[in-house]
Each structure stands twice: as structure tokens, then as C-alpha cells.
Image (cartoon, coloured by chain):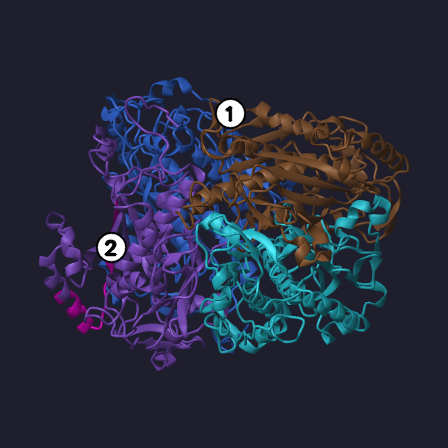
Chain colours: A brown, B cyan, C blue, D purple
């Protein structure tokens, strides 16, 4: 039963509401002996932090993470790691008028229908602020991966926002960290910004597609049939607020391909099998191939907009809703580090599962004198 | 740890290989007192069964399911239900030549790299034959849903296959069961068949997109934040063989919308809140709204094709692979009942979770005299 | 995977070390709409709190619990409840000398062998201080049970300590809260105290047996075969620090009985079936009968004693260990509220499971016109 | 949610009723490459099999186990292993009269109260016949342990039956397999047999205590705080039919000891730390010490006896119940291989968890040049 918990062996449970005193993640299953301190986590939280430029919400949160347990003298001890982030810039007055109104596109109405009551301040539990806790947990996963799989790298970036899409021919890995959109094409960023600011001035918002890539993933992670690596990645990404679609490799476009075009042909490289292409997104039969693991997810446009939308009150009366407050015109931008965090957590989890169920590394090798060497 | 198990309260574990003596599902958590017999399950297995027309594999399997436990005098007892399907038409000789070769696009190479050995006959555990067990488990879920939520209906159909896409203007719910493609447009079926047969004759295969809709789903199913209804649906569909993408409602296209266009406006209907549109696919904040729940998934083209593809042997030597045997030119067709089964299982699971964690039905009502009535 | 988590639908994960900044419990799965505030939890923490009389450790901890999430305007919202207790009276200097020594009877050596490092301050994660978090979680369970099952009562008391055993003929339910030993026999308390103080002066400690009874438990809670009510109670009690045995009803003494003596004969009472005796401890086939649920557990003597014991250092050198610091001469005393908390958690968990899997209450009634009424 | 499932990484789900067509276990998480065939499992099933001597039930069941999946060419593949045992000697007519009557001490009444219906034939799901499936699963665990931890041995035996108790001074490991009572004292067996036959002739039954010991268990298995090795052992043994108490090491008697007497002093042996005694039963802080792991459990007397007991019918009418049919006068005898199976499963599970979460073996060594070597 993992309603607020994610993961199998490496697990985290997030807790907290947008405008409560604090929120955080209870991380269980991190291996012992991993170097970890707050600065290592803060780096990723700062990447997600709001109020850093005009393309995101102006809420000012330090998002300072504290490690309350599970680390001793700079190393993880194998016991639960409690990560707490205090809320400091709650402006609950912004939300007083939505306590008895359902904002279209928000979880207000479903929480009310399910639970009969809800914490309306800032969306309570359904706020995207919950993702700060994921990013902190993802920082722990990154630290453990760094210790266990040197060279593994996880990176996310935007590939589409409304009518704008990335020109793959101009893909530049090094450009990603250099602009507000985590866009792998520095030349396009100004145009994306103009597009987004026009939408914002028009009291509107827009959706986005984020791609997350993991390089250096060992072959053999994942498991048939419900513990597939792609199954858990789909679950991970779909659990992020506002996500409506998840793709692995070719994704939905796989439907348009023929079998001969889609086959990733195999040949023998210097260090083992290699592939002529990566339509599969680095996963076959739910298990990693050793290629880049490639996941994309679509984030719907921010539902909190200044354009009036029709809705009803808790009494069932019609009302026009205009959502004031401080909101991202494209939540997809800040979803980039969240997607990275989820990828890191899934990979670490499957690495630990693999070590537990099979061994310390992939069992089957390929090549002369190998065959079924175990 | 649910590597071969799916679900929380309503759970099933599938077992079995394509060419072993049998396969099946161990279903746990079905409520007691549900009318159930083998014929009720067989109906859905027959829908998935191969060899029924020229658009699917010619393997002839009766796929006769036996209930070995958990049912007494025609009713479930609340104890585990073992569903067994014996394999009768294994032609393992077809696979003798692939035991030491990795077929491109298949799980052969990843199973080898992970486990060091594999059952190569028919793909072993990675065969789509595993989905027969899911369809049987889904039949149990359907029976329980019929008892607990009268009027709930789950239906799947194809919306795209290679270059062909459904014309939504011609959508006809009643046409779905009348053609080999579960196509909601009877007029298009002949054209789709011609397209597929041409591909088959060309020794090729093609992908597809399946949409599964659930009507009559109560509001309130699902839970924040990792036990969301859409999270579990994403996991459910991505776990199906060959699936590379999953969408809820607008899906990937949500990225192209503005917030004003994407908002499903709310008004008060006769029996409670209604929505002017369903971009959300019936789910907000991970919890069902009471609208149709709409999921789509993309199935990649069958990797087993007669067109030669380059690969390597277990010794690392280059080889050209032509996959003989009996294969579906479009596995997406037979994925339709599988998607339906997974939808039914997820809905029953979340219904039971909701009853356990909250109550017998949605707690919050909307309208005069209500407010936060519990 | 529930290494630091307990429960199925009502779950809690404890975190924190004895001398870290804080410890707590992340509680997930509490139903919404339950009245809850910090004072309701503090009541139980105060019962467990150290330093209250000369029979327990003199460590002074306020053990003030804060609710950081999951409660809004005095009611649970159905989202995770974070309970945090700050450590205020750590005297880590007491433990400086044990960082490189293994105290006999303690987890020092096994944590070292397993993890390669450990937080030695106060026993770190293995300290009985972890049970404060359980008691807080148990307070949430009690609040939910009070709302869902009026009249249900959970009570623990001591039945043995070293050479002293309770005289069952003098059992007095009302005496339990009136003495330092939670002893249901006020007249015996002075003698127990004299016995314990003599041991303490002799630099020794002693074990104890605690019995926990739940009255008013509905029939039908529990499930075959691994989710039995008694299975989960055994797991719950054995997870408490220093517990070495768990009994249900007759417990180990059941081995000495004949079948005719052990049978709890059934007769028809005014409100349903009743039993002539309760050898079973209120559980048959893993499912509650409606009688009192009776569990006992044995707590070993405190391992931290001033009597020198032989051990080794981390370098493998022999050493005599005398454990200074502030320790309970009989940890069993303070285990009473911990046992109560675990009982409350297990009962709530199984109540929610029962509602989810079967219905809102027991399905089968007994008596005229009933039979298999559903 | 593991209501009919046991284990974390190595898991099995049992299914089947006493008089249904078959019963079995779905085993998930066995590592690949373990040599396994049906004969290896049958050995343990034969040990539990009824009808072998006059001290057990005369029901004749071949209990022939079939492996339906997960094994290829004599080796496990890492995929689920389905173990099926067909029922061949059901005499359901023996149970016709109990369908509407509740046998005292049986689960009849609680299943009725919970589920509203039950399979009454032979006790249905609550029959001790379910333990055959556990023994089969335990055989898989034994095979995997043999491959992963050479020298590890699991052995069970009786230490008490009614008024008879083992004379520990006469303990003889080699005698265990030589008598019908798995008694480590050959000289006492005739007396135990006479005692049991006298009870049987008197239409009565009796309880027993079984001890299970594991030798050669590596240090470091287990985990704080709810995934303790002893917690899982308590859960494992308490889940066995008719078990009412579980003890680790000193067990309930720990309550009578002083801290100075209970301390297992540590010294440095040739190959690492050793202990002067084993009051702890090989587990400290939930983690194995490397000593023998010692568990005991009490089995209540068989409830099915020919001595009349008072009860009620499903209509609530009084009735005298005499349970005919073929029953063990002491079910404890046949619980010995069941306890062994559960021990093996718990150890394998924790071994895999340890490998997954920490590494391939204990991390911390003790002795010169070690300290916190990782």
C-alpha cells in the first residue's frame, strides 16, 4: 500500500501541505556509507525553487532542507532519512476565497468529493509544492547513485511548450543549464520567453513536454512483469502534478512505425553489445539495455489563471473563478528537476532490487568464452 | 515488492512461460459473495484468443481457464482465486534457433544480461502470452465491479494503426465489437485490414494506439500522491508488453494547450456537479471526477518479423535474424482486451481502497444543505 | 518492503535517532474527518515519558509532539500526518566511550557488522527512544478507532517482572493507572518497587511480561493466511525493542492443554454468539471473534547495566563494559504504552482492511432468519 | 498488502482449499541460476505428508508437487515459480454436517462472521492443508540458500507435547530424523507415543512446542525497526495454523532474568567475534549475530476431537459437536517441517534484502586494521 510512498527498496514518503508549517520526505532504504549533507540536496532544491526569474511564480521560498535523521558524521547509516523543508512564505489570505469554490482543472472538487473536507490553503496536499520533497529525496538518490555507479548522469530539459518545439538538429547538451527553460538550444530561449510572457500578460498559461535522459545506466535493471523499469518510470512521472502523458523512447509515435523501422539492430562493440538506434528508449522487456534511458512527459497548462472560468461553489451555485495568487505561467519549467529526481529514485531503486535479486551486477556476459557464464 | 504482482488491495500475480505447461494468475483480495464461474472469465479470454482471424497470429490456443480455488458454489469466498490456463499448442521447435541469438526489439538480450539464462521458447516469460493471465484476472475484477458498481462499463478500441487513425467524427460505440480491429467505425475496417495485410505480405508489422474508456466510475477513486488513479493506470498500461506511451485525457497534447482552453468548466447538473468538457480524462489530482475515465496507450510494432535484421549471437558474433513462427502483424489488436482488463483491475482496486480508507462512497456532497456533510 | 514502516492501509514509518535533533512518525492512511490535536497525542506520550519516577530512567525529555501535516482545523484530512518530537536532553558525552566498543546485549555489534558504521550516541536508531514515535502514531490510531468503533478500549499492564508475577485472583482493572508499574493489583506495587530498587542498587536490571487487552473489538477483523490479526500482532509486539516472546490467549501454555480443555465452547447470547471461555485470546483462524483480544509479550532485562560484562572493541581487543548513563532498571515498565500503541495501530489497520475488502461490517449474522444473509 | 502473501523480496502467495481440486504456492523473487527440480521439493513435502504413521491423520495424500513455471532446464530463471499440489483424497462427505455448524476452536465461525459464506469442506482455506504449499515454497528457499550460503542448515524438532518436555541434557541432533516426533532424544520417543495414543483413544488431542534452529546464518541479516529478522520470524511462525506463541532465544523466560545473567558476553574468536552464550537466540536489535538463530512456537491442541463440545448452528441453535473425520491427535508433529520452511523463507528473504540494501556481505569487520572498513 503505497499511497503516499514511492519505491520498492529505496522508498520515500512525502508529507505536508502547501501552507502548513513544513513539508518533507521520509526516505527509507538508502544504503549506508553514502556521503551526504544538506548542501548536496540544496543544490537540486535551488534548481526547483520558485521566484528565481520572471518565468516562474514569484512566491519566495528559501526551500532550505534539513536532514533530521539517518546521517552521522557526513555518511548515511542505512536508517530512515528525514528531510524537512519549512514553509516560510505562505500567503494564505490569497486562498481564503477558494475554500468554498472549486477551481476548474484543480483537485479542489475531487478532494472534496472523496474526503468531505480539505485544506484549501494553496491547494493543500495537491499543491505542486509537494514536489520540493521529491526533489530532496531525489538528491539522496543521486548521492547514492554517484557512489554505486560512477559516471551515471541524469538530465532533464524541455522539448516543447505550447506551440514551441525543440529543433532536435540544434540539440546542445551543454546549453541546458544556461537558460530559464532548461532548453538544449540557447538560441531558442529568447523566443520561448517572449511567447510565455505574452501568454502571461494575456492572463493565460501553457503546457510543456519534458524529456529526462539517464546516461551510463547499467544493463539489467528492471524486472518482468509489473516491476518493469518502464512501468515504474511511467508511474513516477505520472505521479507528478499536472502530468497527463508519459513516453519511453519513441513513445506514442511507436504506433506509427513498422517493425522493420522500429528494430534497434544489435552489433558487437568493444565493451559489449551496442545498438544501431534507440527507438526503445534504453528498455527492452522492462529491463535496461545499457543505452540511454529516455523518458518524456507532458505537463498540462497551469490551471490557476486570471482568465475567468465558470465553476460552482460548495453549495452548488454557479460562480466565475479567477485564480489570483502567485502562479507559474508554465509549471512545466519547474517540473524539469522534479522529473530528474523521479528518474534518479527509480534507477537507484532498481539498482538495489537488482543487487538483491540477482547479484552485484549483470550476470550474463556476451562474447567469446561466455555464453551462460554465471 | 510487486515485481510480478499488480495492485494494492485487489492484487494479482501472474506466472508462467509461453511454452511451459501452463500459465495463470493468482488473484488475491476479491471481495466475497461475488458470483463467478469459468464461463464469465472465458468470455474475455476468447476476445483475446489468438488464431481467430487472419489479422492475428495463427497459433491455436483454446485458452481455457480453470478456477482452482477461491470460489465455492458459484461465489467468491474472499480467499485467493487461482486461474490456470494450460498451454496446448506450443511449437517450441520454432524457437530452437533463437536460444543463442538475440532478436532485435525483443527482451532476449536484456533477460540474458540480467539473469544469465532464460527460457527461450516463445520468448518465455516475456511473451505476450502472459497477457492471457491478466485478461483472466480482469474478468474477476469485472465480476466484482458488476456487483459493487452497477452500470460501470469498461470498453477498449483502436484509434490508430500505423498511418491509419480513427476519424473521431465517425465514432460509433456500437461498431466496436463488429470488426476485427475493435474499431469504432465500421466503414473504416476494410481499409485497415487491407493496410495490415499489405504490411504482413511485405514481411513487416506495425504499431497501434488503443483507447480504453470507463463509464459510470464513481467520483472519489484515487489518492494523493503516489497512489493516484492515473499513476496506477499509467503503471498498468505501461506494464503491457510492447507499450511505449500512456496518456490520460488530452495526454501528450496537453502540452500544446493554454490554461483557458484546457479548463474543464464545472456546472451544477441534476444529480451533482457536471463538466463542460473532459480534457482531464476523468481524473483531477489523481482522483476520479465521475466523468468517463479515458486512457490511451501506444503499442510498438511486433518485433518478430520476417524482414532480416542485424543482430549478434550469445558468443557475440554478427548474425541476420529473421523471426519465423506465428506472430501478430499488429499486436495492438489483441492488446485491446488486455487494456480493458487492466482498467477493470485498477478501478476495482481503487474502489476497495476508497471503501477501506474513507467509507462506502464519496463523503462530500455538493449542493443545498451540504457543504461539508460527512 | 516495510523495513521502517508498519501496517497495510494504516501505516506509519518511524524515523530518528536517540540523540539526533528530532524523531517522529510519518502516518499514512488515517481516514479523513477524525478529530485530532496535539493534546490527544501528548496524553499517551506523557504515559511513556521517562523521568517521571524513580523506577524509570532519569533522562528528562518533554517529548512534546508536533503535528506538521495532515490535520486542518482540528480534523484529519486523509493525507499523511507528520508527527515530530524534538530531542532536548541528549547527553551524548555519556556515549563517547561506546563508539568503539560493543555493549553485550545491545545492537552495537550487529549494526556494525551490517552497516559498517553506526550512530553510537544513545544507541542511535536502536534506542528504545524510537518507541516514542510509535506511541504518537498509536495516538492517531486511538483517535480514529474512537470515531469508528465507539466503546473499543485498549489497555496494557504488567503481569510479571523477574521473580514477581501477578496474582490473577486479585486482578483489578481500575488499579492499573494508579501505580508506577501499571499493575492491576495495587497491593502488590510496593513489593514490586522494593524488588526493583534492590536490583537497581545491585547494578542490575530485570525483564518483564506485559499483557495488552482490547475490549469491544468487532468480530471479523483479520484475514487468512499471512494477514492474520494474530500474525500482525506478533509482528507488532516483536518489533518493540527487547521483546523476545509474544503470546495470543493461552500462548505457549497452549502446548500443555488437551483439545477438550482448550475448546472455547460457543452458545447463543442475547446479541449474538458468545463463548464460555477465551483460550483463543479472541482470535480464531486469524480473525477476531468479538471477544477480548489478549496479547502478551516478554521484554528482556535492560542490557545497559553497571555490572561489568566482558566484550570486545572494534579492533577486536577484550574489554570490560560498564554502561553508565541513565537507564531504566526494567524497560518493561515503559513498554506498556508502547504495546498499547501497537495494538491500536493493528486494530485500526485491520478495521480499514475489513471495510475495504468485505464491507462496512461483519457480513454473516447468526440466528433466526439469517444463515448466509449478505 | 500481503494478506495471502509472505515475504519482501522472496515472496510466496499460497492458494487453495482443503477439498478443492488443487492448492499451491506462487513463488516470486527466487534468484536465477538455482538448481531446482520437483524431487528437491518433494523431499520436504514427504516429511510433512499425512498418513505415514499412526501418530498423524490417516488421510492419504500423495502431495505430489509440480513445478509449472520459473524453471528451465533444471535452473530457476528468476521468474515466478508456480508450485501445484493436486488434492486426491478429499472425502467431503465427512464434512457435510459441519456446513451449518461451528466447530469450537475452529475458524468456522469467524470466516462466517467475516465473509458471510465459506467453503466448509475440510475447513476450506483455514485447513492446515495450506501448509503443504508453504513447505513447497520453503523447498525453493532451501535450494536458493544452499546455493548462496553453503553450510547453512535449518532444522526443527519438538521440545514439548502436553505434559511431556524434552530433557535438554539428552539433546541429540542426530536423533531427530529417527522417530515419529522429530524428537532429539531417541529414548523418549516410545513414552511420547504411548502418551499420545492414550489421548487419542480418549478422543482427545494435545498441544506441542516446536523449536527451529538455523546454523550457519551470516551476521548482518535483518533491519531496524519493523523489518527486523525476529519480527519476520514471529510473523512467519504465528501465521501457521494453531500457533499461539512465538519465542526467540530465551523467549518468555527472558522476563525472569536479570541483565547480568542475560548478557551474552562477547570475545574474539579465530574468525571474528564469538559469544559466551546465546540468550538472544542469535538476534540483536533485529539483526543476526552469526550465532544459531533459535525460534520456538507453541501449537494448540487439535480442535477436531471426538469428545463432544457445545456449540451453535448457523441458525443460532445449540448443538453438541463431535468432529469425525481423519485428524492429527497432535498437529504439532506435522508443524515441524512447516516451521522449518518458514525459517528458510525468512532467511532467504533477509539475505536478498541485505544484498540489495547493503552489499554482498556484512560490511563491518572487527579486528586489527579494520574499524570501519567499507
Q: Which mark is residue A287?
A: none
Estimate the x, y position of residue B66 in percent, counting from the top left.
49, 74
Estimate the x, y position of residue A241 in percent, counting from the top left.
70, 43
Give above or below for C346 relative to C307: below
Q: Does B200 appear in magenta?
A: no
Q: In the displayed structure, does residue A23 sit left or right of residue C137? A: right
Residue occupied by mark 2: D210
User: Which residues, given as a range, are shown in magenta?
Assistant: D194-215
The answer to which quarter of the image holds residue A207 is top right
Residue occupied by mark 1: C21
Estimate the x, y position of residue A97 in percent, counting from the top left.
81, 40
Instruction: Locate the C terminus of chain D and report the quarter of the image it occupies.
Output: top left
Q: Residue at x 49, y 71 (%)?
A: B87
The answer to which quarter of the image holds residue C310 is top left
The answer to which quarter of the image holds residue D50 is bottom left
Q: In the displayed structure, does residue D307 sit left or right of residue A229? A: left
Helix, strand or loop at mark 2: strand
- Name the chain letter of the residue that bears numbered label 2: D
Question: Taking the image as drawn, is residue D132 in sight?
Answer: yes
Give above or below for B106 relative to C273: above
Amino acid at each position: 500500500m503505497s499511497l503516499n510512498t514511492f519505491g520498492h527498496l529505496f522508498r520515500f514518503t512525502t508529507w505536508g501541505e502547501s501552507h502548513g508549517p513544513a513539508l518533507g520526505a521520509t526516505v527509507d532504504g538508502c544504503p549506508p556509507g553514502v556521503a551526504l549533507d544538506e548542501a548536496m540536496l540544496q543544490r537540486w532544491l535551488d534548481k526547483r525553487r520558485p521566484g528565481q526569474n520572471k518565468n516562474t511564480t514569484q512566491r519566495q521560498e528559501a526551500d532550505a532542507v534539513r536532514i533530521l535523521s539517518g546521517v552521522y558524521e557526513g555518511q548515511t547509516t542505512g536508517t530512515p532519512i528525514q528531510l524537512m523543508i519549512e514553509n516560510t512564505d505562505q500567503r494564505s489570505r490569497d486562498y481564503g476565497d477558494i475554500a468554498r469554490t472549486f477551481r476548474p482543472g484543480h483537485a479542489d472538487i475531487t478532494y472534496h468529493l472523496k474526503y468531505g473536507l480539505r485544506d484549501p490553503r494553496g491547494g493543500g496536499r495537491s499543491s505542486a509544492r509537494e514536489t520540493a520533497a521529491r526533489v530532496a529525496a531525489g538528491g539522496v538518490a543521486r548521492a547514492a547513485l554517484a557512489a554505486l555507479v560512477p559516471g551515471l548522469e541524469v538530465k532533464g530539459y524541455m522539448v516543447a511548450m505550447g506551440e514551441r518545439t525543440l529543433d532536435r538538429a540544434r540539440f546542445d547538451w551543454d546549453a541546458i543549464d544556461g537558460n530559464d527553460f532548461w532548453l538544449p538550444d540557447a538560441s531558442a530561449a529568447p523566443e520561448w520567453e517572449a511567447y510565455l510572457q505574452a501568454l502571461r500578460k494575456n492572463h493565460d498559461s501553457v503546457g510543456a513536454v519534458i524529456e529526462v535522459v539517464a546516461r551510463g545506466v547499467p544493463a539489467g535493471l528492471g524486472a518482468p512483469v509489473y516491476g518493469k523499469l518502464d512501468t515504474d518510470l511511467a508511474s513516477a512521472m505520472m505521479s507528478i502534478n499536472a502530468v497527463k502523458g508519459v513516453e519511453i523512447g519513441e513513445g506514442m509515435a511507436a504506433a506509427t512505425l513498422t517493425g522493420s523501422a522500429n528494430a534497434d539492430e544489435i552489433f558487437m562493440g568493444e565493451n559489449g553489445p551496442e545498438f544501431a538506434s534507440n527507438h526503445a528508449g534504453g528498455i527492452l522487456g522492462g529491463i535496461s539495455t545499457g543505452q540511454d534511458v529516455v523518458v518524456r512527459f507532458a505537463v498540462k497548462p497551469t490551471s490557476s489563471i486570471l482568465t475567468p472560468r465558470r465553476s460552482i461553489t460548495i453549495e452548488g451555485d454557479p460562480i466565475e473563478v479567477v485564480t489570483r495568487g502567485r502562479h507559474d505561467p508554465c509549471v512545466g519549467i519547474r517540473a524539469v528537476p522534479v522529473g530528474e529526481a523521479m528518474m534518479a529514485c527509480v534507477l537507484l531503486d532498481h539498482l538495489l532490487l537488482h543487487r538483491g535479486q540477482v547479484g552485484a551486477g549483470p550476470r550474463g556476459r556476451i562474447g567469446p568464452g561466455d555464453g551462460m557464464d554465471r
